[in-house]
Image (cartoon, rainbow, N blue to C red):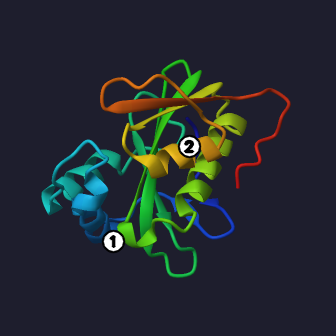
C-alpha cells in the first residue's frame, strides 16, 4: 500500500503510529490485570513491549495479512490512551478489528470514537466490505460498544463472541 493513512483525527483523539516513547505507557496498560483479563494475554512485560515495537514499526494502516496496531492519543498532550488494531484480509474484502484502552481512559467514549474512525477508514478509504470483531463473551462493555457502532452479534464460540458489520454501498458512515 502506497503512503500512510495515519494520522486520523477525530473530535477528541488522534490515531497515529506508535512511537518508541509510547512503550512504557503501552506496557503498563497491557500489564494491568483488569485490562488483560478480556484479552489474549496474561502478562505483558517490557520485553514484550520492545518486541511489539520491532514487529510494528514498519507496518502501515492498509497493509494486508498482519495485525497493524494504531496508537490512540490525546491530540493536545500526545499522551497514549489506548490502541486499536486491524488485520486486513489478503483480498482486501474483510478486516478484523480490536481495541484496548488503559483503565483510566475507559468509560469516556474514546474507544467508540477511535473504533468509529477506524471503521470509517476501512470502509471508505480501503474499500473493505465486511469488518469483524471478537470479544470475550463476558465483556459486556465491548458488546455494548460494538452494538452501538452497528455491529451485529453472532453466535458465541466458547469464551468468545463474534460481531460483524457490512458496508452499505452509497450510505456514508456516521460513526463518530
Which sits in the foreground, 48 or 36? Answer: 36
Image quadrant assignment for residue 114: bottom right
The numbered dot on residue 141 is none
Tally of numbered tags: 2
Left-right relation of 76 to 103? right
| Residue that carries the numbered disc 2 in the rendered image | 146
**Mark toward the start of the polypeptide (1 vs 2):** 1
| Secondary-structure class at tag 1 | helix
Judged from this view, the residue extending furthest toward the bottom is 77
**Percent from the top left, x then y, of residue 172?**
81, 40
Q: Nearer the viewer, residue 60 or 161?
A: 161
- Neighbour tally class for label 2: few under 14, some 14-19, many 20 plus, Cα within 10 Å: many
Q: Position of residue 29 (x, y in %)?
A: 30, 64
At x 56% / y 43%, what residue is drawn?
Answer: 146
Reading the image, the residue beneath label 1 is 21
Q: Kindly state the secondary structure of the residue where label 2 is placed.
A: helix
Whole-percent x, y for residue 27 in the image: 25, 63
* Residue under the image location 38 percent in, 37 percent down: 137
x 59%, y 67%: residue? 13
Q: Which quadrant of the view contains residue 12?
A: bottom right
Which quadrant, please, contains the C terminus? Answer: bottom right
- Residue 45 is left or right of residue 165, and the answer is left
Left or right of residue 53: residue 63:
right
Q: Nearer the viewer, residue 98 or 22?
A: 98
Residues at marks 1 and 2, CA–CA distance in whole angstroms:
30 Å
Q: Position of residue 124 (x, y in %)?
A: 72, 38
Is residue 60 placed above or below 7 in the rendered structure? above
Amino acid at each position: 500500500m502506497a503512503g500512510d493513512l495515519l494520522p486520523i483525527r477525530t473530535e477528541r483523539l488522534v490515531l497515529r503510529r506508535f512511537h518508541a516513547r509510547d512503550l512504557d505507557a503501552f506496557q503498563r496498560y497491557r500489564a494491568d490485570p483488569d485490562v488483560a483479563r478480556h484479552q489474549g494475554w496474561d502478562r505483558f512485560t517490557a520485553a514484550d513491549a520492545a518486541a511489539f515495537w520491532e514487529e510494528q514499526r514498519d507496518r502501515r494502516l492498509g497493509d494486508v495479512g498482519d495485525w497493524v496496531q494504531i496508537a490512540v492519543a490525546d491530540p493536545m498532550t500526545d499522551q497514549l490512551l489506548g490502541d486499536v488494531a486491524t488485520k486486513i484480509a489478503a483480498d482486501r474484502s474483510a478486516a478484523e478489528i480490536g481495541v484496548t484502552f488503559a483503565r483510566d481512559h475507559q468509560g469516556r467514549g474514546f474507544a467508540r470514537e477511535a473504533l468509529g474512525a477506524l471503521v470509517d477508514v476501512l470502509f471508505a478509504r480501503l474499500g473493505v466490505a465486511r469488518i469483524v470483531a471478537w470479544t470475550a463473551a463476558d465483556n459486556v462493555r465491548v458488546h455494548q460498544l460494538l452494538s452501538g457502532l452497528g455491529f451485529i452479534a453472532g453466535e458465541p464460540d466458547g469464551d468468545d463472541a463474534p460481531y460483524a458489520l457490512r458496508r452499505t454501498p452509497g450510505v456514508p458512515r456516521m460513526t463518530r
